[in-house]
């Protein structure tokens, strides 16, 4: 899983600011997933993207959250006007092909703290 | 409600003993996966078992799947201090068309 790179590892934001989390998938992977983990909880699926396309965003909050995976560059998870409840660990994962029958590889996560 | 729920929530054993963790789920699945997470780190994939498989081995790990009971177990034999981590099961149902659904995990502590 060391191949999936996320940054920043830790991010502190004040309420109302924007948080931008980046994820570079493993080399050769074109499928990216974002998950959120609240303290003492399991991971919750947020969104699944391929290059330039959002495939499944059924786990994304309806407001303030957006994700993209441009043709060039990393995938970005953007949280606007952050609130305390957004404090969590955000994990990116990638796979070579789509579908949950394939192994997905996780990054080390980005820990967001909203103060 | 959780699709995958691990049991127990926490487990503390002596080094060298075997550790067994269980996972129950609610809806039909195509596959079930187990992951390990060390504190403050990302998830490491351990093993995937498909719905038509009953048992799978990988090193000191043994996973079973009983689709009639909608349950799976992860056995770690001859535990080591380095096995201390949280262990999660994840299923391919209930987490969006392409998302995995994770349980809350079992926190395993191996005492030296």
Image: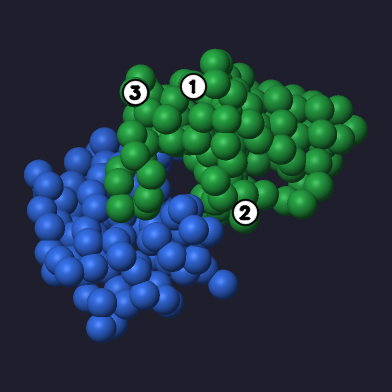
Chain colours: A green, B blue
Residue contact between numbered discs 3 and 2, judged by CB atoms under 8 Å: no
Asked if residue B25 lies left or right of residue B1, the reply is left
Q: Same chain for labels 3 and 1? Say yes or no.
A: yes
Task: Name the secondary structure under disc 2.
Answer: loop
Residue denoted by label 2: A59
Crowding around mark 3 (Cα neighbors within 10 Å: few <14, some 14 to 19, many 20+) is: few
- Per the image, the residue denoted by label 3 is A28
Asked whether the viewer can see residue B106, the reply is: no
Q: Quarter of the image containing the N terminus of chain A?
A: top left
Helix, strand or loop at label 3? It is loop
Residue at the location (25% across, 83% down)? B68
Relative to the observer, which residue lies in front, B45 or A26?
Answer: A26
Quarter location, residue A13? top right
Marks 3, 1: nearer the viewer: 3
* Tally of marks: 3
Dividing the picture into quadrants, the one containing residue A67 is top right
Counting from the top left corner in percent of width and height, residue A36 is at: 59, 44
Q: Please provide percent x and percent y for residue B49.
A: 22, 58
* Chain letter behind tag 2: A
The answer to whether residue A100 is seen in the rendering is: yes
Which label's residue is closer to the chain start, 2 or 1? 1
């Amino acid at each position: 899983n060391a191949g999936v790179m996320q940054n920043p590892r830790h991010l502190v934001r004040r309420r109302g600011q924007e948080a931008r989390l980046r994820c570079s998938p493993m080399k050769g992977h074109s499928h990216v997933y974002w998950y959120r983990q609240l303290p003492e909880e399991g991971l919750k699926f947020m969104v699944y993207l391929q290059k330039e396309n959002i495939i499944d965003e059924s786990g994304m909050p309806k407001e303030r959250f957006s994700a993209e995976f441009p043709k060039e560059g990393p995938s970005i998870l953007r949280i606007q006007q952050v609130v305390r409840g957004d404090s969590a660990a955000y994990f990116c994962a990638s796979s070579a092909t789509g579908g949950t029958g394939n192994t997905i590889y996780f990054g080390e996560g980005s820990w967001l703290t909203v103060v | 409600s959780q699709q995958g729920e691990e049991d127990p929530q926490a487990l503390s054993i002596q080094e060298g003993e075997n550790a067994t963790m269980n996972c129950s789920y609610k809806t039909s699945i195509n596959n079930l996966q187990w992951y390990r997470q060390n504190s403050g780190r990302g998830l490491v994939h351990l093993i995937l078992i498909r719905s038509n498989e009953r048992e799978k081995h990988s090193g000191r790990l043994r996973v079973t799947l009983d689709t009639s009971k909608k349950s799976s177990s992860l056995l770690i034999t001859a535990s080591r201090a380095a096995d201390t981590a949280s262990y999660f099961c994840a299923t391919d149902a209930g987490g969006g068309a392409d998302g995995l659904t994770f349980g809350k995990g079992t926190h395993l502590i191996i005492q030296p």
